[in-house]
Amino acid sequence: MTDRPTPGTPPHAPVGASVSAPVNAPVSAVVLDIEGTTGSADHVHTVLFPYARKRIAGWLTAHRGEPRWTEILDGVRTETGTPDLDEAGAVEALHAWADADVKAAPLKALQGEIWAAGYADGSLHGHVYDDVPEALTRWRAAGIARHIYSSGSVAAQRDWFAHSNHGDLTGLIDGYFDLTTAGPKRAPDSYRTISRTLAVPPGRTLFLSDVRDELDAAAAAGWQTAAVRRPDDPRGRSVAGHPVHGDLTGLHHLPPAPPPPAA
């Protein structure tokens, strides 16, 4: 649910050893990416995306005329610049976006609707790496806020963690951000929006992602950053400009920010 590199695109930095470094500045909030960081990118691309694509046309037919149908159709019309686009044209656009993994808000909203039904009937589950629940638990105990930021819709993010292979983890997460509530993940202004929403100083917010462009955008907004590159990541364990961790275990003991002074 994040911006992954196009297959065949060279990485920003050569494959190298992990450059893990402790976070020394105080942290009030951690914001985490999903795909490739807290959960398997392969699960997204080989399970979730195909599941949703096969059901796009059927979902629109089944929900024709309903408010959510109207919202998604209007979103496709806006994104494509064709105000008179009909349902068949919308299906064509949604299929094209799905095939190209375009981060279009109407597609992400519809995927979330389709996945929700799959989670509810047990056909789907979200994948979460084994080290993630412990990290979230430790940060909660330390008084550090925990939020998710993904290109997938807020509803899809919540379902991913509610129906994970480790059970319902939503109690460990304070909130969620997506393309609609924050903005594109490679734009510094999106991180500034999140900072305003959280009312946390940028320098006390730590962003964890596997994508350099996202980390660069967060750093440009004044955030602390750390890359997470899992051992099986084909891009290697080096991300220029950011410390790299192979999982979250090296981030268990973040320095919590002191509480604000009493008024």
Image (spheres, grey):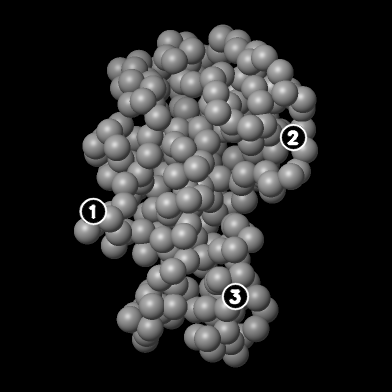
Residues under numbered marks 2 and 1 in contact, where contact means CB atoms less than 8 Å apart: no
Q: Residue at x 55, y 28 (%)?
A: 232
According to the picture, the residue beneath numbered tag 2 turns out to be 11
Q: Position of residue 247 (x, y in %)?
A: 49, 21
Q: Check disc 2: other Cα within 10 Å, few if <14, some if 14-19, many if 20+.
A: some
- Badge 2 or badge 1: first in the primary sequence: 2
Q: Is residue 28 visible?
A: yes
Count up the numbered dots.
3
Residue 93's disc number:
3
Q: Residue at x 61, y 46 (%)?
A: 3
The three-letter code of the residue at mark 1 reads: Gly
Q: Quadrant of residue 12?
A: top right
Q: Position of residue 203 (x, y in %)?
A: 59, 24
CA separation, marks 2 and 3? 29 Å
Is 177 left, or right, of 161 in this rendering? right
The three-letter code of the residue at mark 2 reads: Pro
Q: Position of residue 178 (x, y in %)?
A: 50, 50
Q: Position of residue 250 (x, y in %)?
A: 48, 13
Q: Is residue 109 visible?
A: no
